[in-house]
Amino acid sequence: MIEVRDLSVALGARAVLSDVSLTLSPGTITGLVGESGSGKSMTALAIMGLLPDGARATGSVELDGRNLLPLDDRRMSDVRGRRIGMIFQEPMTALNPLMTIGDQVAEVLTRHHGMDRDAARAVARQRLDRVGMPGERFPLTLYPHELSGGQRQRVAIAMATADAPDVLIADEPTTALDVTTQAQILDLLRGLVADEGMALLLITHDLAVVGTAADRVAVMQGGRIVEEGATQDLFRAPAHAHTRALLAATRHQPARAGPPDAATAGRPILQVERAVRAYTLARPAPLAPHPVLRAVDDVSFTMRPGESVGLVGSSGCGKSTLTRAILGLDPLQSGRILLDGEPVTARMPAALRARVQVVFQDPFGSFDPRWRVDRLVAEPFHLTGRPCGWRDRVAQALAEVGLPPDAMRRHIHQFSGGQRQRIAIARALIIRPRLIVLDEAVSALDVQVRAQVLDLLARLRASHGIAWLFISHDLSVVRSITDRVLVMDRGRVVEDGPTDRVLDAPQSAAAVRLAQAMPRMPGFP
Amino acid sequence: MKVGLIAGAVLAGAALGAALLSLAWTPFDPAAMSIPDKLRPPGSVHWLGTDQLGRDILSMLMAGARTSLSVALLAVAIGAGAGVPLGLAAAAMRGRWVDDAIMRGNDLVFAFPSLVIAILITAALGPSAANAMIAIGIFNIPVFARVTRAAALPIWTLDYIRAAEVAGKGAARISVEHVLPNVASLLIVQATIQFSLGILAEAGLSYVGLGAQPPTPSWGRMLAEAQTMAAIAPHAAIAPGVAIVLTVLGLNLLGDGLRDALDPRLKARLA
């Protein structure tokens, strides 16, 4: 059992944690929620003894009555791994790409117990079986790149729990995963905590994840725990204003216009007709035929002008490939895509290309770090020719997304994730396209920022009549912003209907799986 | 960090300043011989002493800096001028035959031992500073092509390249507008490394008599000529040796410092 008492951490003159007290008892899951920068990860690092250089910590972190804070690096590294395990957000970078999964799990045991290699590998096998990676499908000799994201996270969990630690710290363990995989990983963590009596600290910005998985919840804001209590009580009767604000943002439904009238809407803005995109894979054996992966397999659908459509499915279902084809970045093998009645190709004329724009998922990768905001936002003018008053147009587009005109002269690294996503929307808006594709555009944002961006999208749709194609694995986001939703599974569209109907009464197996996997907060339908 | 940048700039600037100053003025004529004054130790008249023919070593060092820097600079310009566009093209056409052709051509050049071939080229074309420059420059091309391609490949996977494609920009335009500025800091570091290697290569070629020919002064030849007299007049060998070491050190420090100073992300972190 770990007891954190009055833990304060300062980096230079700035206090990053103030009087944090937290008890992690065996067999319970404690959720730690808050927005980015609220001190969640810093708390985890302080418990692990991994604070950055120059950080000063006061208070105590007691593991069974022994204060860990004053321990030196060598003693602390013995405690880490043996008594405290950790799982990170990004399973790809947490595993060594050059080591087999068996060796990585076994290494924990050989290092801390001097166990010989064969015995360690036998234990590693048991641990991988326990995390749902049975020996017949997942031999110890696999490498991380041969596994999916969810499977890698299972290996990371096997590593973190190989030595039966007393405490497991999971920092955003499911944020990089799609909803169905997220539900499986949360199930696995709950099972491990119940069976092995570990204490689990589950750090996340997603209240729904905490609501489904945690026994107790602590809410952080500005380096303090502002509220702490049993999950059910906290969700039903939040006492602190910040908790209430977070819950309201999670449940937020932007006011939105109804779907456009089918009769008056005119020609469809987007028609996808029997689209097929197939990839040839490497031969499984010499001289064997190349297997073919049909990433997009005979997909057809239509969008009307001003319509807001969701495209959902678990990762690998083909939605990203379809997106690239709609943007004219990847060719189709057969079938066709019509934008405003004209075919989409890699070499389509600029005037046609100007009718579709895109907003990407990662607010950090979607801007050239060396360009200033005015030049970044004006980039799509390449398609239409730069009008003489282009700076005013940039200022106007920034104003539409709620940013001041002086943002134009700054570099992109001076903006937060939410601001960057607004700039991305401004860039998509500036040439007034008829269709904007949003590729997981709010997944990386904190709940309160996400609510603001969703409001912005709803407002822009009402004022400009732009059609949105909203690609996501997060059904709650899709519910709040779309009229109609398409469900994709293994390259095919398996369900197409009004959003409320598909989410409340799904018919296809894939839609049922997605709806069931969606984390639900207590007191929220 | 900042100390390195300043020290590097001072050292490289001193070499450059000496080279520029030698165009207008040197304490003595670097080519003027005066046998009675041979092998004078450093003193008030000849600050760094004289060599076996009585030439003023300081004057020869200043004029030699001109040779070394211009040969190395033009060799880097040849290498970067051809190598960077090749690397950008290979990255833009990644996985296609153009990429393969460029990179296998690179491997071919890399497969030859560079200094030996440089000796061969200068021996075949006749020993001169210009031919040394060309020989060193050719072997800089694959270095720049490879570094450019390796740095550009991960950039092509980023979303802002997708955004530029959606804005209708072609591969060539994206390479120039987005890829090149983002690999520039690496190229600057590589250029300073190649620049210092060029100075060493020029010194090496001159040392074996295939670089700049007399009476054009050269640090490499000064070393070679002073070598036989090292026991009785060590100053004649030490002066050009120290000049080479300090210039190369200065360029390396300058390259590292420039990389940190030019990157807006690093700047934000330091601020």
Image (tube, coloured by chain):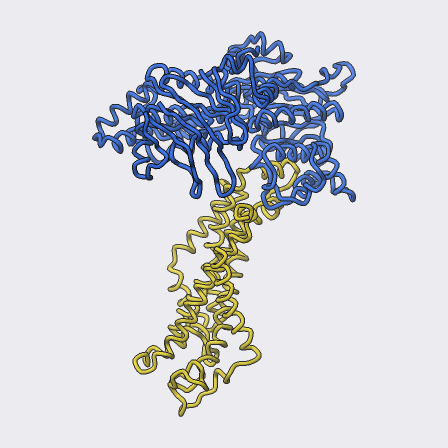
**Residue B5, image x, y percentages:** 50, 59
Q: Based on the displayed image, in which of its 4 quarters is residue A276 positioned?
A: top right
Residue that lies at the very extreme toward the bottom in this rendered image: B36
Screen quadrant of the N terminus of chain A: top left
Residue depicted at x 64% and y 27% = A437
Looking at the image, is A236 positioned above or below residue B191? above
Closer to the camera in the image, B79 or A358 = A358
Q: Is any part of residue B50 visible from this angle?
A: yes
Q: Is any part of residue A275 visible from this angle?
A: no
Q: Which chain is blue?
A: A
How many marks the image carries: the answer is 0
In the displayed structure image, the side of residue A151 where residue B70 appears, left or right: right
In the displayed structure image, the side of residue A419 where residue A202 appears, left or right: left
Screen quadrant of the C terminus of chain A: top right
In the displayed structure image, the side of residue A394 where residue B245 appears, left or right: left
Looking at the image, is A329 positioned above or below residue B46? above
**Residue B64, image x, y percentages:** 47, 75
Q: The yellow chain is which one?
A: B
Residue depicted at x 74% and y 24% = A465
